[in-house]
């Protein structure tokens, strides 16, 4: 009889071990499926299943191109009319571009650019130049003017006109 009891005890332990292993596998499978389902429904998709062309474009868009600057040494100084009185405006400028060829073109054509910038500054309203919005609008008009000159001369465009110092009196 003793032999019969030992053989029945061994299969009972084996059955419990199988049950525990199956429960662990089911729990791990449930966790994995919940993580995958969450990623899928949140719109991130699964890792490695993204659109490879879209990923390549995203990497290409994220490439950082540093800006280069050219500081115009002499200030742009001109008179501005204000309510019948003659006022003065002075602007120290810098040009920003991501293409060095654009800055080289601006240096080459600086006499023409300065002449056009004096005209733009001189035609501005004195009261508007005293506000941040007026100065921002002036910078935009100056950018348009500089890019028109560069386009006429066959040079690439600059990115921005920056004020290093701006005085109206």
Image (spheres, grey):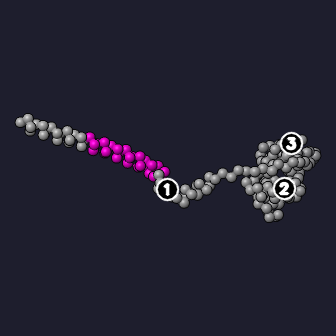
Question: Observer-nearest residue: 135 or 30?
Answer: 30
Residue where numbered disc 3 is placed: 167
First along the sequence among labels 2 and 3: 2
**Which residue does the image show at 73% across and 54% down from the upper left?**
98
Q: Secondary structure at mark 1?
A: loop
Q: Nearer the viewer, mark 3 or mark 1?
A: 1
**Which residue does the image show at 81% across and 53% down from the upper left?**
142
Quarter occupied by residue 99: bottom right
Q: Residues within 10 Å of mark 3 (few under 14, many from 20)?
A: few
Predominant SS of the magenta segment? helix
Q: What separation in Å lies between label 2 and label 3 (alpha carbons)? A: 24 Å
Q: Is residue 54 above or below residue 21?
A: below
Quarter occupied by residue 20: top left
Q: Pointer 3 and pointer 1: residues touching (CB < 8 Å)?
A: no
Asked if the stretch drawn in magenta spans residue 29, the answer is yes
Q: Is residue 81 visible?
A: no
Q: Residues within 10 Å of mark 2 (few under 14, many from 20)?
A: some
Q: Secondary structure at mark 3?
A: strand
Q: Which residues are magenta?
A: 20-46
Residue where numbered disc 1 is placed: 50
Quarter of the image containing the N terminus?
A: top left
**Which residue does the image show at 84% across and 43% down from the upper left?**
166
Q: Residue furthest top?
A: 2
Residue where numbered disc 2 is placed: 107
Q: What separation in Å lies between label 3 and label 1 (alpha carbons)? A: 54 Å
**Which residue does the image show at 82% across and 48% down from the upper left?**
71
Residue 30: percent from left, percent from top: 35, 45
First along the sequence among labels 3 and 1: 1
Count of marks, rendered view: 3
């Amino acid at each position: 009889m003793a032999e019969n009891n030992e053989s029945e005890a061994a299969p009972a332990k084996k059955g419990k071990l199988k049950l525990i292993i199956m429960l662990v596998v089911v729990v791990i499978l449930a966790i994995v499926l919940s993580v995958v389902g969450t990623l899928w429904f949140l719109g991130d998709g699964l890792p490695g299943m993204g659109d490879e062309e879209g990923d390549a474009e995203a990497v290409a868009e994220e490439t950082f191109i540093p800006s280069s600057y050219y500081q115009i040494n002499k200030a742009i100084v001109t008179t501005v009319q204000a309510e019948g009185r003659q006022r003065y405006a002075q602007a120290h400028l810098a040009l920003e571009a991501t293409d060095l060829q654009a800055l080289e073109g601006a240096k080459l054509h600086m006499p023409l650019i300065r002449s056009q910038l004096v005209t733009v500054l001189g035609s501005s309203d004195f009261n508007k130049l005293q506000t941040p919005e007026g100065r921002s609008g002036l910078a935009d008009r100056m950018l348009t003017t500089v890019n028109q000159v560069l386009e006429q001369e066959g040079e690439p465009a600059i990115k921005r006109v920056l004020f290093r110092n701006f005085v109206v009196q």
